[in-house]
Amino acid sequence: MTDEVQAPKTLAEALLAFQAGAGELDLVKDRTGQVGSQKTKYLDLDKLTKATRPLLNRHGLVWQTFPTTLDGKPALRYTLTHVASGQYQDETMLLVLDRESSQGQGAALTYSRRQARQAVLDLVA
């Protein structure tokens, strides 16, 4: 008899395995930003990606984001794919721009990428 772990066969099984191991992730709000006049702490996208990608890959999951448009407005499309089964979950969310510029769109993309990843994977920093 072996202690070999079965690879997840479905997207739901892979996400369950990911969430079971998510407690080992170091997700600490260690960056400071400002919303209006209020200072706030957050987990930056770079740290979130570095922390979650190895665990996603371990369970055969791929996370992708794509800048796009929805009804002619800037948006972010995201996809969580289970490679072995080909099953995926995807959605598109409108970007909320604080200013109409390349920098404003870049900031909205970064914020949305971080929020979508945390929400879909059910992660809390």
Image: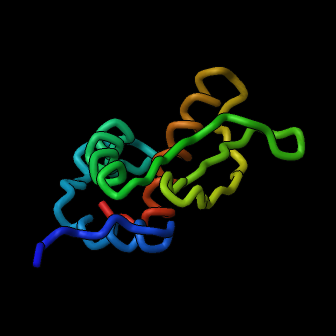
Q: In the image as oriented, which residue stretches furthest toward the top?
A: 102
Residue nearer the viewer, 7 or 27:
7
Residue nearer the viewer, 42 or 53:
53
Place of residue 70 in the rendered image (x, y in percent of width and height, measured from the top left): 82, 45
Choose top left, top right, bottom left or bottom right for residue 65.
top right
Q: In the image as oriented, which residue stretches furthest toward the right?
A: 71
Task: Reply above or below: 122 against 51.
Answer: below
Place of residue 9 in the rendered image (x, y in percent of width and height, measured from the top left): 45, 68
Is residue 15 toward the left or the right of residue 102 in the image? left
Which residue shows up at 79% across the image and 39% down it?
A: 69
Residue nearer the viewer, 30 or 114:
114
Placement of the C terminus among the 4 image quadrants: bottom left
Is residue 112 toward the left or the right of residue 124 in the image? right
Task: Reply above or below: 23 against 51.
Answer: below
Place of residue 57 in the rendered image (x, y in percent of width and height, measured from the top left): 35, 48
Is residue 62 toward the left or the right of residue 101 in the image? left
Which residue shows up at 68% across the image and 56% down it?
A: 91
Placement of the N terminus among the 4 image quadrants: bottom left
